[in-house]
Amino acid sequence: MRSQPPKVTVHVIKKGSHRTKFGGCATMVRMDDIDSAIVRELQRDARQTNRELARRLNIAPSTCLERVRALRARGVITGYRATVDLRTLNRPVQALLAIRIRPLGREVIERFKKFLTSLPEVLSVYVVAGGDDFLVHVAVPDVDRLHALLMDQIFKRREVVDCRSSFIYQHVANDVIEPLPPNGA
């Protein structure tokens, strides 16, 4: 199995920008072609040296380093991380939990988010609109552990009124996230 290079977490949210009521961002950070190429290359391989990155982009290493630092300072590059194989961590079974809670309110949502992120089985939590209030990605050793998580943790919470689980058979993701053009462009 080929080892995966660490990935770069990329957000185009400018520090101090305001979120819309649906979680969007009111402003987008402007990036030129070189910035976009740097972000793209770092998403492909965040372990490459500055010199390697500069060579790939055909720019001077000092320019490359300055650009990477500026992208970090502007909040475009928010961190670096390693991608791991969940099976090697005894988490071969993955599921998405669609959870509804009541009463809906900021305090209840924040408290429930804090609860969910404290559970070791939880990989990520999404607060969503629509029929459900939360989508929760979990990874566990087996179906019995998922059942125990649901019965002993999730359903014991008073605010939970419904929870559906869907097993994940396959998961694919884009390794490189490109900026989208602004509306109307």
Image (cartoon, helix red, strand yellow):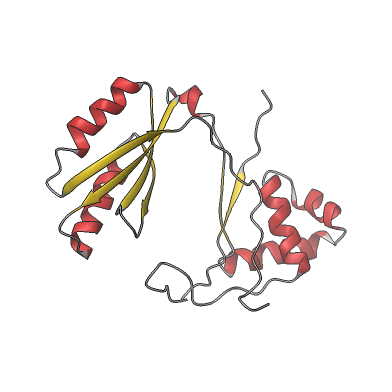
Q: Which of 117 and 145 is in front in this view?
A: 145
Q: Is residue 162 above or below residue 35?
A: above
Query: With 57 as the anchor, is 143 left or right in this view?
Result: left
Task: Indicate the quadrant where residue 90 lies.
Answer: top left
The quarter in which the C terminus is drawn is bottom right
**Extreme residue in the front direction:** 131
Residue 157: horizontal and vertical position, in percent? 15, 43
Q: Is residue 17 above or below residue 4?
A: below
Residue beneath the point at 57% across and 66% down: 12
Residue 56: horizontal and vertical position, in percent? 84, 52
Residue 158: horizontal and vertical position, in percent? 11, 46
Task: Indicate the quadrant where residue 6 lies.
Answer: top right
Residue 51: horizontal and vertical position, in percent? 80, 51
Q: Nearer the viewer, residue 25 or 147?
A: 147
Q: Is residue 69 above or below residue 27?
A: above
Q: Nearer the viewer, residue 108 or 170?
A: 170
Task: Indicate the quadrant where residue 71 lies.
Answer: bottom right
Residue beneath the point at 67% across and 47% down: 46
Q: In this view, does 30 lie above or below 155?
A: below
Q: How many labels does the image show?
A: 0
**Extreme residue in the right direction:** 58
Residue beneath the point at 59% across and 43% down: 173
The quarter in which the N terminus is drawn is top right
